[in-house]
Image (cartoon, helix red, strand yellow):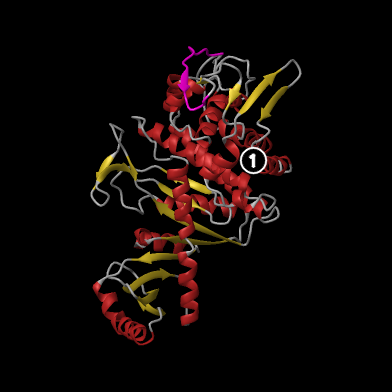
């Protein structure tokens, strides 16, 4: 066990006593809420299968790959996204338990060992991990829909800027964002919120670069599980390019992509904009109208269906376009198609959880491959949390809760740990107000299905 010199802090607000605050070398942890998540992980064989994707070239290592994987992944869930944090956490009894050691065993890996672990991951291992994300995503969909893949699946494609600070490989300056950055690509599914693909890219690439290949890898995994599955793809205007239209049309995928406005489209819609503005001036009520028409840009090889939305309100007018290959013949169908497209706003919330809630922007290794592995680590932590919270038996505060909510309500709970010859006892504070939530999570995970 790591020992600390006693450093006392004196707080003199009590009138008749001296109040002293100091560190304690006993088996105490602040993260006992990781234990039920680890139980779910154990039953699903999640990190076990993830560790099987990695290669360990060492002979008789003191810290195994699966232990270091769990140390990093559960550290991310508990808000310890930096490897430096583990210099102090290596003797934490709860982190030892979730990593696979007993509280009185030797300490876990320190920051230098974890950094070497991140930098030894090969490109071949990354491909295995990508397949792992696909396999677990298909399993989540099957579990969500009573052990069978649903007949229709929607995929949301999103890029996100990831600012860098230092000498990371392929961290380049992006003029639009005004920063040195990476530009990851994320493909997720809205009902399970599972991240099917997380692709790290250099900082100056086009938003759609590589999206066609990543999309088809996900589609092939879905069709392998169910040949007749219908796949619909949604993305913003960065993906509204001929290459994405082509790959969807050639592979029998439906799509709805944002379409950037231009002078030609604005001229065509100007009469409808004027009518909506006039109706708002006359009634004082917000106006929202739609149009559907065939359109062919100069770079397109064919005519395609475009849906336009016009809004007029107190702040002025708003004009938006989407292009789709879904059948849209009436204004009611145009409204339905557009309203389905804007549901992809939930994917932006998932991006916020991944990037800010789970700190997926901490890609500070020098090597690009190591940063790619870090991105997958953070995405894997998000997929594990999504799988735990996706159950109707949980209270709404946890089902809808972001990572910060899970930390404040479940994960961040202080506990003393007692190890005996026959068992390990974790004691929580009797006055902790979230015991009901904690107990509910434990019931949920103990009834969870086992993984393959």
361 and 27: which is toward the camera:
27
| x and y percentages locating residue 255 in the rendered image | 46, 65
Q: Which residue does the image show at 44% across and 49% down from the upper left?
A: 352
Q: Which residue does the image show at 49% across and 49% down from the upper left?
A: 217
Query: In the figure, residue 323 lies in which quadrant?
Result: bottom left
Q: Residues within 10 Å of mark 1 (few under 14, many from 20)?
A: few
Q: Residue furthest right?
A: 422
5 and 310: which is toward the camera:
5
| x and y percentages locating residue 349 in the rendered image | 47, 53
| x and y percentages locating residue 433 in the rendered image | 64, 40
Q: Quadrant of the C terminus?
A: top right
Q: Is residue 398 left or right of residue 301?
A: right
Identify residue for label 1: 433
Q: Residue furthest front?
A: 16
Q: Is residue 444 left or right of residue 69?
A: right
Q: Which residue does the image show at 68% across and 27% down from the upper left?
A: 427
Q: Residue furthest bottom?
A: 282
- Secondary structure mostly taken by the magenta-highlighted segment of the chain: loop
| x and y percentages locating residue 275 in the rendered image | 33, 86
- Helix, strand or loop status at disc 1: loop
Q: Is residue 11 magenta?
A: yes
Q: In the rendered image, is residue 320 in sight?
A: yes
Q: Which residue does the image show at 47% across and 41% down from the upper left?
A: 358
Please tell me whether residue 177 is drawn above or below residue 265 in the rendered image.
above
* Magenta extent: 1-15
Q: Quadrant of the N terminus?
A: top right
Q: Is residue 276 magenta?
A: no
């Amino acid at each position: 066990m790591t020992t600390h010199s006693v450093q006392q802090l004196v707080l003199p607000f009590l009138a008749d006593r001296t109040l002293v605050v100091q560190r304690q070398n006993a088996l105490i942890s602040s993260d006992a809420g990781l234990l039920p998540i680890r139980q779910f992980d154990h039953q699903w064989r999640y990190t076990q299968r993830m560790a099987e994707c990695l290669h360990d070239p060492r002979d008789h290592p003191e810290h195994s790959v699966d232990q270091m994987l769990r140390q990093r992944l559960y550290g991310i869930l508990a808000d310890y996204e930096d490897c430096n944090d583990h210099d102090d956490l290596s003797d934490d009894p709860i982190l030892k338990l979730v990593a696979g050691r007993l509280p009185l065993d030797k300490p876990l890996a320190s920051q230098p060992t974890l950094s070497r672990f991140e930098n030894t991951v090969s490109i071949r291992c990354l491909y295995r991990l990508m397949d792992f994300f696909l396999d677990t995503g298909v399993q989540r969909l099957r579990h969500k829909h009573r052990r069978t893949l649903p007949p229709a699946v929607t995929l949301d494609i999103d890029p996100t800027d990831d600012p860098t600070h230092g000498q990371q490989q392929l961290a380049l300056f992006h003029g639009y964002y005004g920063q040195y950055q990476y530009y990851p690509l994320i493909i997720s599914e809205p009902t399970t919120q599972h991240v099917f693909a997380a692709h790290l890219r250099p900082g100056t690439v086009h938003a759609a670069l590589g999206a066609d290949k990543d999309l088809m890898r996900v589609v092939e995994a879905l069709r392998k599980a169910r040949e007749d599955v219908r796949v619909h793809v949604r993305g913003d205007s960065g993906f509204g390019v001929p290459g994405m239209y082509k790959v969807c049309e050639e592979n029998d995928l439906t799509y709805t992509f944002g379409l950037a406005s231009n002078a030609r489209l604005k001229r065509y819609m100007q009469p409808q904009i004027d009518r909506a503005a006039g109706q708002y001036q006359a009634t004082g009520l917000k106006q929202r109208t739609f149009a559907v028409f065939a359109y062919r840009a100069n770079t397109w090889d064919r005519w395609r269906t475009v849906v336009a939305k016009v809004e007029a309100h107190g702040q002025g007018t708003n004009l938006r376009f989407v292009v789709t290959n879904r059948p849209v013949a009436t204004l009611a169908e145009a409204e339905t198609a557009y309203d389905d497209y804007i549901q992809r706003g939930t994917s932006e919330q998932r991006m916020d959880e991944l990037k800010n809630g789970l700190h997926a922007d901490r890609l500070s290794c020098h090597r690009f491959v190591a940063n790619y592995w870090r991105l997958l680590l953070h995405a894997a932590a998000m997929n594990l949390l999504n799988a735990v919270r996706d159950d109707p038996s949980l209270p709404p505060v946890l089902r809808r809760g972001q990572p910060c909510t899970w930390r404040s309500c479940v994960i961040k709970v202080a506990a003393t740990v007692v190890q005996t010859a026959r068992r390990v006892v974790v004691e929580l504070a009797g006055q902790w107000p979230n015991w009901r939530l904690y107990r509910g999570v434990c019931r949920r995970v103990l009834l969870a299905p086992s993984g393959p």
